[in-house]
Amino acid sequence: MGRQSDLLAEATRHLPQGVAENYRYWGEKTVFVEHAHGCRFTDADGKQFVDFRLGYGPIILGYRDDRVDEAVYRALRQTGTTTGFATPLDHQVVQQIKALCPQIEKLRFANSGTEAVMGAVRTARGFTGRDRIVIVEGGFHGLYDEMMWKSDVEGWDGAGDPAVVPFGRGVPARTRELVDLLPLNAHTALEALFAQKGERIAAVVLEPIMGNCGSIAATPAWLQALKATCEAHGALLIVDEVKTGFRVAKGGAQELYGVYADLSTYAKAMGNGYPVACFGGRAEVMDVIGATGGVVHGGTYTANIVALAAAHETLDLLAHTPALETAAQVGRSVQRVLGRVFTAAGIEHRFTGPDAMFGVHFSDRVPTTYRDWRRTDGALYARFAWQLIEHGVMLEPDSREPWFLCEAHRDVDLGWLEDLATRALREALEASS
Ligand code: PMP
């Protein structure tokens, strides 16, 4: 029993599960971080990890990036944290985002991805005068009631459609009435849903590259069809780029597809780990905010100086240095390493998604929907991941969470990774036999 077990025992007396949010609870393997820098961190037992989990995606440059941290200190010394008034940084950061994301004409800030999605959805409802929202199976859009309905693919027997269930208790059944779930890449289901309810749908919210479902991606044809269908029915398209934004390309997933949404949400990579988020899009839509009788949006900490100074510096670095190319390049190398290890062991595998946020699936075909994901060997993946963690490579032991790369991964020793991955896979296979 190490220090981490003692910390967890003590913390459990003070926080539910001993952690600050549910997803950090890993039972007796719960991690307490002592020190972090670059792409590495050390836990409270003194064990060092190369981290491909990166806090679920916000770290794009590296932990404790001096350039971003110094910019935050400078801003803090000038204006403090928040005054409840505007600062010139507000529109400067919006201009930076507009330079990278051509579909953004106007924008508002938020403090988390959840809050950005809430703002976008309310704005879409305010603009269209409609209430219904469509989400895509396998997507994740934060912990707010209406977005907390999911297709129960894990409990599905493969016949008909999976049941739609809440994430947990406390989600009012009434919120379900306004939400429809749509499988990714399913043309017929898309047409059928809009034929039935199209005139009542305010917006479709999706991650075109599902950062919460193993980077399973929309086909360009389906995304185009989705946009056209929304347009034809007067519904808005909301692309949730909380994970993909300023990571998979400077202009996010939309740049890769060349398909642009009415509203987009961003968070995570835009602040290299500082808590900042935003939503924005067409001026005509966004201008429903603040109009007489229009949409109300705000919050005490919105566009606080820490958040905006971090975003200003991070976006500047992402726009004007090769940081994203570096992260993608290492991601390609890591996939090559893993691919060699899996092939040598005779394990069928497929990689999905962009190089700086790739998914790994033990399967003989690329999954194209959340339902397909169920046919991959997630159990073997989990055993492999736990062994990697044991040997000092951190990742989420669930193949629905992709591998995240940051600029600081450029110094990872790929030979070391290949040896560890070989060992971890051998141990995972031994455990299965
Ligand atoms: N949207 C997406 C696509 C996400 O991945 C997440 C978080 N993982 C959220 C929204 C919610 O963001 P936050 O945790 O910052 O509230």
Image: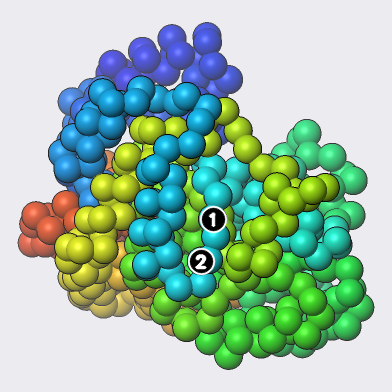
- Dot 2 amino acid type: Ile
Image position, residue 39 (x, y; %): 20, 46
Image position, residue 38 (x, y; %): 17, 43
Q: Is residue 199 left or right of residue 24?
A: right
Rendered residue at 79%/56% (across/down): 126
- Dot 1 amino acid type: Leu
Q: How far apart are labels 2 and 1 at the CA level?
A: 7 Å
Confirm whether residue 354 shows in the render: yes
Q: Secondary structure at mark 1?
A: strand
Quadrant where the N terminus lies? top left
Q: Nearer the viewer, residue 281 or 147?
A: 281
Residue that badge 2 annotates? 104
Residue that badge 1 annotates? 107
Q: Nearer the viewer, residue 273 or 428?
A: 273
Q: Nearer the viewer, residue 202 or 23?
A: 202
Tell me which corner region of the image, top left, top right, bottom left or bottom right, holds residue 310. top left
